[in-house]
Amino acid sequence: MEGKEEAKSQHHHEVVIDVEEVKKNFVLGSRVIQALKDVTLQVRSTDFLVIFGPSGCGKSTLLNIILGLDKPTKGTVKVRDTNIYNLDEDQRAAFRAKKMGMVHQMPYWIKSLNAIENVALPLIIEGGKEKNAMREARKTMQELGIIELSRQIPTQLSGGEQQKVGLARALVSDPWILLADEPTGNLDSKSGDEIMSLFKFLNQKHKRTIILVTHNEEYWDNGTRRIEMKFEV
């Protein structure tokens, strides 16, 4: 992977994520596949960073490394000065649960719970009281304009509605950073545009730090910063 960056504006704000000289290799049989080569990246508190590139260029690998899910072969990843790979797996999992919100291409649900209960679940898992968790879930769904979906079963919702509920679940813990891996990948263009509008709203109005990975060039312009990842020739 190699990357090229464009920025709409450069202001001095707190560095939230500091990726330094990260390299990632995978071993397949007798072959060593280089997924990332010497990636250095800083993400600031007001950034909406769009990482764009074709499938297989290393976008999701980079996102997983930032999340603390996939240890790099070389290099460091700091989240607000915490070197996350100096933590053990349990510590990283706890850090991720409290400080990072994740939106997947396809949301996963506890099928016996309705939408608002699924949104509240991260707070309950962290040890919060159910009453408080439900209050925060309701507040988050109201902010996103989806409170009418609260009693629905998520698997019975449309793809766009499910993704909005998934976004609420990612936000309910008030994370430092919101990360999204191909969040519009399974949606029609109208639903995809609605999701991207919500990300822009969260960044502009609520000052959320966002990293979004996409292979859809239509969404290249939505971020305040943009990185294009390519296969290295």
Image (cartoon, grey):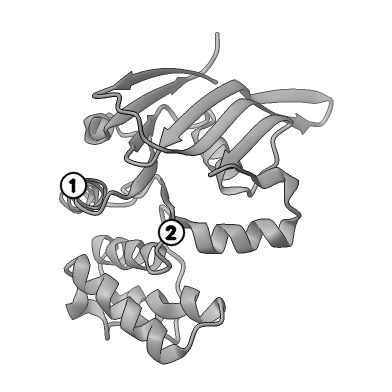
What residue is rendered at 26% in x and 81% in y? 150
**Which image quadrant: the C terminus?**
top right
Horizontal and vertical percent position of residue 156: 30, 76
Q: Amino acid at mark 2?
A: Pro
Label 1, on which residue? 193
Q: Neighbour class for label 1 at 10 Å: few (<14), some, many (≥20)? A: some
Judge from the rendering whether residue 66 lies leftward or rightward of residue 157; answer left or right: right
Could one spot residue 1 in this view of the protein?
Answer: yes
What residue is rendered at 43% in x and 68% in y? 173
What residue is rendered at 31% in x and 34% in y? 216
Secondary element at tag 2:
loop
Horizontal and vertical percent position of residue 88: 76, 55
Earlier residue among tags 2 and 1: 2
Using the numbered discs, state the Cα–Cα distance from disc 2 to disc 1 in whole angstroms: 23 Å
Could one spot residue 114 in this view of the protein?
Answer: no
Residue 175 marker:
2
Q: Residue furthest right?
A: 30
Q: Answer whether labels 2 and 1 touch (C-beta < 8 Å).
A: no
**Which image quadrant: the N terminus?**
top right
Horizontal and vertical percent position of residue 80: 53, 44
Q: Nearer the viewer, residue 158 or 19?
A: 19
